[in-house]
């Protein structure tokens, strides 16, 4: 499942970050921020208009990501 599809408040573990194109700068930036295999992630909230942006927590850091950016992150839901 993609991070953008995760339910609000749900926990997951990052599986990978997909490149949309060769040398994708957004995917590289996400990896630099810590979206790497095995990292726990939580969808904290969604924006009021069109559920954009998404408030995502990885470790102790929170990020506001566009839905298109979050869609690059493949996660596995944690029960």
Image (tube, helix red, strand yellow):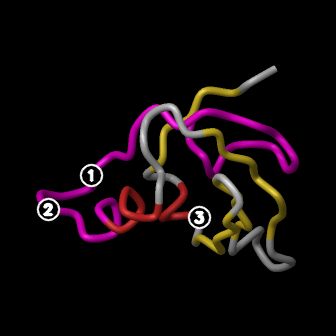
Of the image marks 3 and 2, the number of the one nearer the N terminus:
2
- Up-down relation of residue 43 to residue 38 (above or below): below
Left or right of 1, for residue 9: right
> Which image quarter holds the C terminus?
top right
Report which residue position mark 3 lands on. Answer: 67
Q: Is residue 20 magenta?
A: yes
Q: Is residue 56 magenta?
A: no
Q: CA distance from mark 2 to mark 1?
A: 7 Å
- Up-down relation of residue 47 to residue 4 (above or below): below
Q: Percent from the top left, x then y, of residue 5?
A: 67, 44
Tell me the SS state at disc 3: helix
Which quadrant of the structure image shows residue 58? bottom right
> Which image quarter holds the N terminus?
top right
Q: Which mark is residue 51?
A: none
Report which residue position mark 1 lands on. Answer: 19
Mark 2 touches mark 1? (CB < 8 Å):
yes
- Up-down relation of residue 63 to residue 70 (above or below): below
Q: Which residues are magenta?
A: 1-28
Which residue is pictured at 64% across the width and 71% down the height? 63
Left or right of 23, for residue 39: right
Report which residue position mark 2 lands on. Answer: 23
Of the image marks 3 and 1, the number of the one nearer the N terminus:
1
**Crowding at label 2, few (<14), some or many (≥20) Cα neighbours within 10 Å?**
few
Tell me the SS state at disc 2: loop
Q: CA distance from mark 3 to mark 2?
A: 20 Å
Q: Percent from the top left, x then y, of residue 66?
A: 58, 72
Q: CA distance from mark 3 to mark 1?
A: 15 Å
Which residue is pictured at 27% across the width and 55% down the height? 20
Q: Percent from the top left, x then y, of residue 14?
A: 53, 37
**Crowding at label 1, few (<14), some or many (≥20) Cα neighbours within 10 Å?**
some
């Amino acid at each position: 499942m993609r991070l953008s599809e995760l339910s609000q408040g749900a926990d997951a573990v990052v599986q990978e970050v997909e490149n949309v194109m060769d040398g994708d700068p957004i995917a590289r930036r996400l990896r630099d921020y810590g979206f790497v295999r095995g990292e726990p992630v939580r969808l904290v909230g969604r924006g009021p208009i069109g559920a954009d942006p998404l408030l995502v927590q990885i470790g102790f850091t929170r990020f506001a990501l566009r839905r298109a950016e979050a869609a690059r992150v493949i996660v596995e839901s944690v029960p």
